[in-house]
Image (cartoon, rainbow, N blue to C red):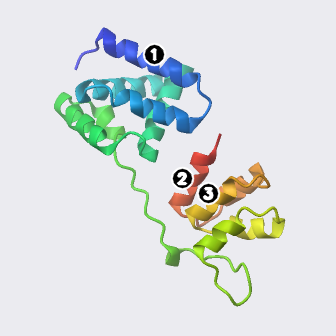
Amino acid sequence: MKTTDSNERWIKKTCCYLSNLSNWVQRSVLFAEAITKLSSPNASFCFSSLIRRGFTKRNPYYVTGTQAALYSILTGSWNLEHRTLTREAAAAFDETLTLTFLVEPQIPLYEEETFQVPKYSAGKTLTLGERRSLATTPNRKIIELAMSDPHPMVASRLLSNPKITEDDVIRIAARRSIPPALLSEIAQSVK
């Protein structure tokens, strides 16, 4: 598919608008809303062109647009039906960048038995709800325990705890064995 003035305007307008936002969740949602308004062939072209510009031109507007596009795929903001139609259009027009980057993330589901849950108290195994509740406490000792909890729902609560520091988040992410879903929670919590 060849470039059109309307596709060029869409790319520039969307990237400019995304750059004015500071929240990555908002950026990904806005990108998803904007691209789903395009027909699948135009969406394929715009996505491919945006990826190319983001990686080669290093213009801050295009980089922000590219990151928002990829984040919208990772978080599922860009709905699956439209992404599928866009991939089909990309295959028809041989848009290799779209086919390369517009894939379903293969993040394995969290499996409780794979990762060790910390012992919050002697003798009693806490439920997920109890562990999530403890993750909101200001008690530093409990926060330290919650930091080693592998469940993404516990991490989500912990990351919104005002007592957690940037160093704490780095320690969580740097652990040797960490569920991919937990890394996703960390990435989504960054403001």
167 and 85: which is toward the camera: 85
Distance in Å between CA atoms under marks 1 and 3: 33 Å
User: Mark 2 or mark 3: which comes first in sequence?
Assistant: 3
Residue positioned 34% across, 45% down in the render:
103
Is residue 104 visible from the viewing direction of this image? yes
Residue positioned 75% across, 49% down in the render:
166
- 86, above or below 75, in the image: above
| Residue 139 position in % (x across, y down) | 82, 66
Residue identified by numbered label 2: 184
Question: What is the secondary structure assignment of the residue under circle 2?
Answer: helix
Residue identified by numbered label 1: 13
- Place residue 140 in its image quadrant: bottom right
Which residue sits furthest left?
92
Quadrant where the image shows the C terminus = top right
Distance in Å between CA atoms under marks 2 and 3: 10 Å
Residue type (three-letter) at the residue carrying disc 2: Ser
Q: Is residue 123 left or right of residue 98?
A: right
29 and 184: which is toward the camera: 29
Residue type (three-letter) at the residue carrying disc 3: Ser
Residue identified by numbered label 3: 156
Quadrant where the image shows the N terminus = top left
Q: Which one is in front in this view, the residue at disc 2 or the one at disc 3?
A: 3
| Residue 171 position in % (x across, y down) | 71, 58
- Place residue 97 in its image quadrant: top left
